[in-house]
Image: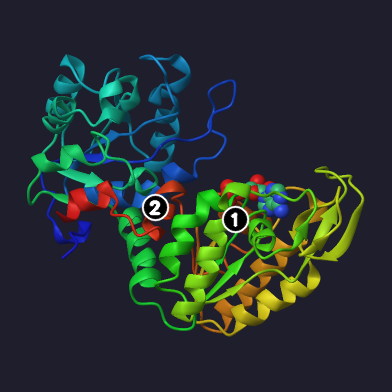
Amino acid sequence: MTPKLEQFSFQDQKVLMRVDFNVPLNDQFEITDDSRIRAALPSINHILSEGGAVIIMSHLGRPKNGPEEAFSLKHIVARLSELTNKEIQFANDCKGEEAVEKSKALRAGEILVLENLRFYKEETKGDSDFARKLASLGDFYVNDAFGTAHRAHASTAIIAEHFEGKKSFGFLMAKEIDNAEMVMQNPKRPFTAIVGGAKVSDKILIVENLLNIADHILIGGGMAYTFFKAQGGNIGNSLCEDDRLDTCRAILKKAEEKGVKIHLPADSIIADKFDAQANTQHAPSNEIADEWMGLDIGTSATEQFSRVLLDSHTILWNGPMGVFEMEAFEKGTKGVAEAVARATENGAFSLIGGGDSAAAVYRFGFENQVSYVSTGGGALLEYFEGKQLPGIAAING
Ligand code: AMP
């Protein structure tokens, strides 16, 4: 059974909680989007209200060589204090005397934030001695950082071995896992996966794993053109990975053998250059003239994909249908988002993978009309590739 936060008593427990406070900061080190901090509040507040104290561990940015002002977690202290309505204590180091003393002195209902874990290389290396030192600061371990669940870092995985029977997912991470499991382990059928984005090579493992689970796979975005070329189509200057043509052919063959229907976009919006102001035309996706490139799925393809989606009971979406960042090439992604929203209204369960698909859903204002928008980019991708995530295994194991 997966341990859940609500099963435990936290009375007088010091809870070491790994969160993802990797928030964007501006030049003045002000937080420009605090959603990751807000996302951890339910777990923090629960532990405090159950009589525990919380010791927060996180990374921020990508410091290269030890401590750097720009990546200090002290920049998040004021916002966390506002959001929790509490005074926050801060340790200038995540290990060593100050961290030990401040953890010892922490009382029930109090919060201590440790300095950026990635000021030490040992964190990303998954160093066991570093993990042991972190572990010595608390009595109980909670992981609520789904975004780093695919990493076997000291604070996301290795540390858990010091907390046998005293470890749990936080609420955010539990919700992410429940939703991902709902799609991959027991989907209501028909199950349609939408896979898009720039490159076939980034999405091969996902598509291969989905061939064992999905009923339909809709392929859009730049990656579709390698499939068209693999089938002998003309794709002009569209994105293409020539070293993946055989892979595309193998995927199409395997799909046929397994009875999974792969849908490629019948038509495209094509452009004479990769530019928001480019000249554009409509063309069949396998008949794109030289010097032109497909930058979005066309209107027939959007209708074609929408029909499949409206017949689906489970939908997973990862990757945009075109260069949605430019208005001229956003229609396909927007149309698909609309179809996912309508299918959801009709009772389908829809999960939007992190990264660019999540950004598109927010940009077009559909975030409240889909079932769940995941916060995990790489972690969710690896989950859908069928991999075991170290951050999940460490708690479950
Ligand atoms: P990914 O990170 O692999 O999901 O790719 C997302 C990126 O793919 C976005 O920045 C899109 O602009 C880009 N993209 C989507 N469709 C195309 C296309 N047809 N040609 C070039 N880039 C594309």
Question: Against 202, is 385 above or below?
Answer: below
Q: Residue furthest right?
A: 279
Q: Name the image quarter holding the N terminus.
A: bottom left
Q: Mark 2 points at which residue?
A: 382
Ligand 1 within 8 A of label 2's CB? no
**Residue in the foreground of this view, choosing between 230 and 379:** 230
Horizontally, residue 19 falls left or right of residue 235, namely left
Q: Name the image quarter holding the C terminus.
A: bottom left
- Under mark 1, the amino acid is Leu
- Under mark 2, the amino acid is Glu
Residue 49, given in percent of the width and then of the height, sits at: 23, 50
The mark lying in front, picked from 2 and 1, is 1
> Which of the numbered marks, if any, corresponds to residue 347?
none
C-alpha gap between disc 2 and disc 1: 23 Å
Instruction: Give SS at disc 1.
Output: helix
Residue 370, given in percent of the width and then of the height, sits at: 55, 69
**Which of disc 1 and disc 2 is earlier in sequence?**
1
Residue 193, given in percent of the width and then of the height, sits at: 52, 69
Horizontally, residue 270 falls left or right of residue 15, namely right
Horizontally, residue 389 falls left or right of residue 329, namely left
Instruction: Give SS at disc 2.
Output: helix
Label 2 environment density (alpha carbons within 10 Å; few <14, some 14–19, many ≥20): some
- What residue is rendered at 62% in x and 59% in y? 361
Q: Mark 1 points at which residue?
A: 245
**Residue in the foreground of this view, choosing between 152 and 293:** 293
Question: Against 148, is 210 above or below?
Answer: below
Residue 363, given in percent of the width and then of the height, sits at: 67, 54
Q: How many labels does the image show?
A: 2
- What residue is rendered at 7% in x and 52% in y? 165
**Residue in the foreground of this view, choosing between 167 and 218:** 218
Residue 330 seen anywhere in this rendered image of the structure = no
